Image: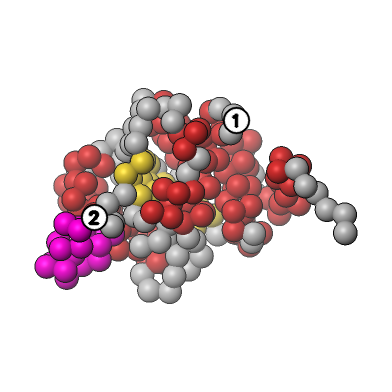
């Protein structure tokens, strides 16, 4: 069987296949690349219909990266999916505390999820940062609460939790917020690879070296 073997050839061919599904969406070049990478990460062209991208989200993420902002994630899978070599050029750190024993203790004591407890523990550190949530709706709810009630405003929230309980509601709330630029999707779709793909896509817009 003859098949494409070179990684960049595979990626380029994938983008060719994705392109027709973005026609008519009125996307600029940067938005097209973010949409394309999200679809590529999911293997699902139906994402084109449900992605919601705040008009300031790409620029806000780029500016945060360039000033060395940290990325805060809800689960290790998001941290794993972000291109460390590309991110390392900007000087920030990728933080995830969901597995910390003290976070587990707080979550148990307060009757909340560990992802929620982790975001609460980061607290004011989240101001001006990049939030990338790919699994836990409760983490997204908590970040939005911190923004609204405590005026802790990240530079951007990439909120793409997946699932049937709370995911759609948390993403709807994110899309309705007027405080922080965001990237999200409607409904139950999402996941850590999709959240990481958004970060990677925006980094590659700044510097395409992998």
Residue ID for mark 1: 208
Q: Tell me if 2 is positioned left or right of 147 in this view.
A: right
Q: Quadrant of residue 92?
A: top left
Q: Tell me if 83 is positioned left or right of 177 in this view.
A: right
Tell me: residue 202, above or below residue 164.
Answer: above
Q: Main secondary structure of the magenta part?
A: helix
Question: In the image, what residue occupies the spot 36% across and 70% down?
Answer: 166
Q: Where does residue 203 sit, x and y in percent of width and height?
A: 51, 34
Say what secondary structure mark 2 lies in: loop
Extent of the magenta region: 101-117
From this viewpoint, is residue 133 visible?
no
Furthest residue in direction left, as rendered = 109
The residue mark sitting in front, 2 or 1, is 2
Separation of disc 2 and disc 1 at Cα? 34 Å
Tell me: residue 119, above or below residue 84.
Answer: below
Q: Where does residue 136 sit, x and y in percent of width and height?
A: 35, 62
Labels in figure, total: 2
Q: Where does residue 153 sit, x and y in percent of width and height?
A: 26, 41
Query: Badge 1: few (under 14), some or many (20 or more) residues near its Cα, within 10 Å?
Result: few
Q: Earlier in the sequence, mark 2 or mark 1?
A: 2
Question: In the image, what residue occupies the spot 38% across and 54% down?
Answer: 76
Tell me: residue 124, above or below residue 143.
Answer: above
Residue ID for mark 2: 100
From this viewpoint, is residue 76 visible?
yes
Say what secondary structure mark 1 lies in: loop
């Amino acid at each position: 069987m003859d098949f494409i073997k070179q990684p960049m050839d595979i990626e380029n061919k994938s983008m060719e296949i994705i392109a027709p599904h973005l026609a008519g969406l009125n996307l600029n070049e940067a938005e097209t690349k973010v949409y394309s990478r999200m679809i590529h990460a999911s293997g699902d062209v139906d994402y084109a219909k449900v992605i919601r991208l705040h008009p300031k989200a790409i620029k806000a993420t780029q500016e945060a990266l360039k000033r060395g902002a940290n990325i805060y994630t809800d689960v290790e899978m998001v941290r794993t999916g972000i291109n460390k070599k590309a991110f390392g050029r900007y000087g920030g750190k990728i933080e995830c505390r969901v597995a910390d024993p003290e976070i587990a203790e707080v979550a148990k004591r307060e009757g909340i999820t560990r992802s929620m407890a982790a975001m609460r523990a980061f607290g004011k550190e989240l101001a001006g940062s990049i939030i990338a949530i790919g699994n836990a709706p409760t983490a997204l709810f908590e970040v939005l609460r911190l923004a609204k009630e405590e005026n802790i405003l990240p530079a951007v929230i990439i909120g793409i939790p997946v699932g049937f309980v709370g995911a759609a509601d948390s993403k709807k709330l994110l899309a309705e917020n007027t405080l922080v630029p965001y990237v999200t999707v409607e409904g139950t779709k999402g996941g850590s690879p999709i959240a990481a793909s958004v970060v990677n896509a925006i980094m590659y817009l700044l510097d395409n070296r992998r």
